[in-house]
Structure formats: C-alpha cells, structure tokens
Image (cartoon, helix red, strand yellow):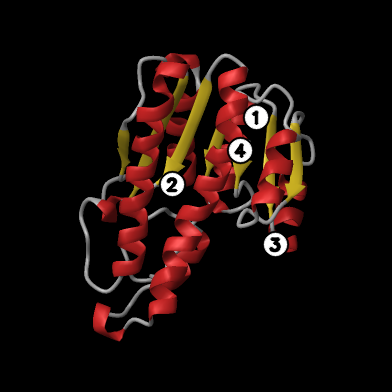
Amino acid sequence: LVAGGTGALGAGVLRELLDAGRRVTATWVEDQERERVERDFADAEGLSLVRADLMDPGAVGSVVDGVDDLRAVVNLVGGFAGGKDVHETDPEEFESMLRLNLRPGFLLARAAMPRLVEEGGGAYVGVSARAALRPFAGSAGYIAAKAAVLAFVQALDAEYRSRGVRCNVVLPSVIDTPANRREQPDADHSKWVPPAEIARVIRFLISDESAPVSGAAIPVYGRA
C-alpha cells in the first residue's frame, strides 16, 4: 500500500516497486494526478488506484481492508508551508502542518499494524525530512511536524519490531520535482535528490534484503 502514490515522489516509488514485481495499491485525491498516473502506467501490471481521504479513519480503514495479502505500507503523504517566523505564524497554519504530516501516517499505522502482524510481519516506511535534524528559519510548523513523523515511526518500531513489523523512515532534503523547480528556479538542481533514487531506498526498506533494519532514520539528501 503506497499512500499518496500519485504525487511526484509517489510516481517514482510506484515505478520502482512495479518493476520489482510488487503488486501495489496506491491512494489518490486529485483527479489530475490520477489521470497522469493512469497515462504513465497504462501498461503496468499489478497497480490498483483507490481514491481515499487519508484524514478520515473510516476511509483509511477501508483502504487497508481492501488490500489483499498486505505486506508493506509506505506513507508519502505530507506537505510544506513556510516563509514566516514563529511570531508571524497563525496557530491554524502551524496546526495544519502537524495534521497534514502526522495524521495520515498515524491512521495508516492504526489500521495496518494488526493486518501486518496477522500476516506474519511486514514493513512500514514513513517520510520525514532532513529539516527534522537540521532546522532552518521560517518553517517551524513544517519542521516540528517532520520531527514528529520521525519520532512516531521510531515509536512504531518500539511497539511492533518484536511482532515482526519493521518500521523505518527516510529523510529527504529537497526532492527534485517539477513543483520544487518552479518554486526555486535559481537553485542548483543538480544537488537535489531525484524521486527515483529515494524510491530505490524505499524498495530496499520493504524488501527482505533489509531484514535486520528497523527503527532507522535514513538520510536521502542527494548532494545538498
């Protein structure tokens, strides 16, 4: 199950997992993103797309229940807002960062962990950010939320490792996506990390190759 699988990073993860022979269920919200994935993956076998509001516990539960033979959950849902110091930030904006970056991962784990334990084990991968370890000015809500994602996944590891579920988190810097290039046209894009490279790390973390790895925070910084 790849939550948020129709975004820029999501498309890279889908390609990597499908090429590795995985059957993948990916969630979507925006019609435009679904249409792009349907077009780009028209010939792919093993891909199912499910519309789901991952802020809603019932919707998340239905998505998890609908995945046969669930072995791994990859949560790519999150977002960024910034540009203001703390004294300039509305409480609602701060809380929206916490909600967007934390709630879907919590709801997915809440619904999926019993399934993964029942299936004999599996993997959960979340996405934090380098900023959780190396904060920068002007984005306290985002940074606090990504630090909380890191702590949450490590808490999952503490609770479920002994039951066979490995829980890890990746920490990107700036991901080389079209949206980020539009927002930072003068940046050195060669230092950013391509989605495909992060996708390879995620594939490793849900594979048997990474059997001893749980509770890890994996830097995927590129050259930045």
User: Which residue in the protein does label 3 denote?
Assistant: 30
Instruction: Say which element carries label 3.
Output: loop
Give the residue at the far bottom of this rendering.
88
Q: Amino acid at mark 1?
A: Leu
User: Which residue in the protein does label 4 denote?
Assistant: 111
Alpha carbon distance from label 3 to label 2 = 22 Å
Alpha carbon distance from label 3 to label 1 = 22 Å
**Residue 113 locus on image (x, y percent):** 55, 30
Q: Amino acid at mark 4?
A: Ala
Placement of 114 over or under 52, stated as above or below:
above
Question: Along the polypeptide, which appears first: circle 3 or circle 2?
Answer: 3
Residue 115, quarter of the rendered image:
top right
Q: Nearer the viewer, residue 55 or 175?
A: 55
Question: In the displayed structure, does residue 133 sit left or right of residue 45?
Answer: left
User: Which residue in the protein does label 1 denote?
Assistant: 18
Q: Nearer the viewer, residue 209 or 184?
A: 209
Instruction: Say which element carries label 4.
Output: helix
Q: Residues within 10 Å of mark 3 (few under 14, many from 20)?
A: few
- Can residue 186 be spotted in the picture? yes
User: Which residue in the protein does label 2 denote?
Assistant: 194
Instruction: Say which element carries label 2.
Output: loop
Alpha carbon distance from label 4 to label 2 = 30 Å
Question: Along the polypeptide, which appears first: circle 4 or circle 3?
Answer: 3
**Residue 200 locus on image (x, y percent):** 46, 31
